[in-house]
Image (cartoon, grey):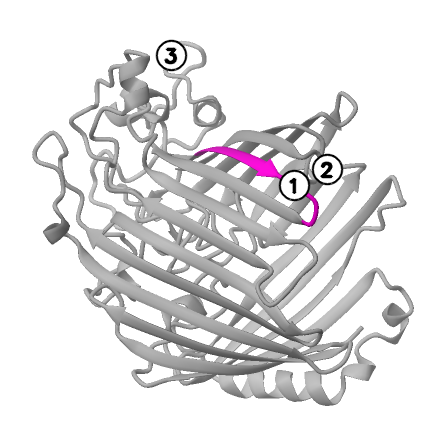
Amino acid sequence: MYQSRKNTFSFIGILFTIGIQAVIHFNVKSQQDTSFHARIEAQVYASDTGITPFWMRSLQYGQVPLENPGVVVRAWAGKNYQWKKKYDWKYELEATGWGGKQNDFWLTQAYVSGRRGKWELWAGRRKEVYGIGDSTLTGGFYAWSGNAVPVPKVQIGTIEYINFANSWLGVHLTFSHGWMDNQGPIIKGYLHQKSLYGRFGKPDSFISLFAGINHQVIWGGEAKVKTGGDYDYYPSSLNTYFYVVTVLKDREIVPTDTLSRYDDLGNQFGNHLGSFDLAVKFQPKGWEVLVYKQSAYETGRGFALTQINDGLTGISIKNTSGGFIDKITLEYLYTANQGNYISGLAEFFKIKDPHQIEIESYFNNGRGGWQYFGKGIGTPLIIIDRESQQGGGDNFTLNAVKSLYLGLSGRINNTLFWQSRISSSYYASPRNHLLPRLLESDFISQFSGMISFQKTLNEKCSLNLQFGYDEGRRVKNTLGGSLGIKYSLF
């Protein structure tokens, strides 16, 4: 997707001209229905080194290029649900185009969804995040963060939480099947994804408790480069899908695929990752405080609790009445244990992991890195090699990470808003922790920061200004900025 394509820049210019100069002719009939909306926006990027600063390109669903100078144009149209109806449908269509040092054009979103009450079925490519936390100002949820272009899926699940017991209990769940790209060593691979979250406490209670899990599996497919060996093709039958979904290890329940090999039969089919999530939410008058923990896991070792200390810990404080600072989000990402130690919980419950000596090299596996179209799917703070000073492809070499992140947002007045993201991070290679633990000297440091301002000109038009800065040894040192305009058609 990141290779230049003929006439892309000219196409983007035409798209931008049509969008800005002829928006009133977009769809006159749709303007009469307030459930239909459309907008177009353009952003110009530049920096002193030709690399877009880290926090200007991260968590943008792959819509901001790594290299600049250039322009990004996005055109979006969609129909929302009308919640007074028991049955309804919606769609979103969003096109993104790059012109400049990198040239490309693709559909960032393209899906259709139908619902009955709070149950929903949709198919296509859609922007999402998975996990419990502050989705608006986070430095990136651990497993599924909104950093990469959305994976095309078919999904059934609930919209937010379905309430029970006079709204004291809530349940939110999803189940989906997706199709991975062909960028890594495996082509024609599948994605299995599901999540289950529960809430104890009413939506407006002073205190509410949350807990849940998200589970992702890359499975099936075939090797891009065939060697004539056992792993040219991977099991992809419905019988294999049963084991992928259930993670059961008793291979006598249903017959196994004839392509199954030792790893499949003795461990799990496919590569598994996700997070166990816990949170508590406080809602004193005028405030919202959310404290959360996303514990990382990979393969089938999650229940051995050897990875329970790794993951994302955060607190978000929001002033619901607004102000110069209306939200503060502080997060700590730690992934340096990597399943190769005994946690306090494992000791307490006397859980012994037969794979204790093995390292879980987060976001790396035999099927390629945890990426989609060249961007990491999980937290961007575990940096993909292709975006690093060290270079490389779609793996995550320095994935033992310690990172402190601060997000701030607020308003200067009723038409001028600001947001800032700052991170101080340390990176190292995986290391066996049964030997001496990683030392401070084993890590390299990285600082990244960004501040943005958004000025509302009127109910349809707004301007955006950003500045970003990187200094350290993981991503390239750079100072850059962008200037953009967003126009709502209706």
Is 409 placed above or below 486 here?
above
Nearest to the observer: residue 327 or residue 168: 327
Q: What crowding class fits label 2: few (fewer than 14 Cα within 10 Å), some (14-19), or many (20 or more)?
A: few
Nearest to the observer: residue 176 or residue 215: 215
Q: Are marks 2 and 1 in contact (CB under 8 Å)?
A: yes
Q: What crowding class fits label 1: few (fewer than 14 Cα within 10 Å), some (14-19), or many (20 or more)?
A: some
Is 161 placed above or below 377 here?
above
Indicate the position of residue 419 as horizontal and vertical percent values: 53, 68
Query: Element type at marker 3?
Result: loop
Nearest to the observer: residue 72 or residue 231: 72
Label 1 and label 3: CA atoms lie apart by: 46 Å
Label 2 and label 3: CA atoms lie apart by: 44 Å
| Residue occupied by mark 1 | 283
| Residue occupied by mark 3 | 250
Q: Residue at x 84, y 60 (%)?
A: 35
Indicate the position of residue 218 as horizontal and vertical percent values: 40, 39
Query: Element type at marker 1?
Result: loop
Q: Earlier in the sequence, mark 2 or mark 1?
A: 2
Q: Earlier in the sequence, mark 2 or mark 3?
A: 2
State the count of labels: 3
- Find out whether residue 413 is within the magenta segment: no
Q: Mark 1 belongs to which amino acid? A: Gln
Question: Would residue 131 be seen by someone viewing this image from the given angle?
Answer: no
Indicate the position of residue 44 as horizontal and vertical percent values: 50, 84
Nearest to viewer (mark 1 / mark 3): 1
- Find out whether residue 277 is within the magenta segment: yes
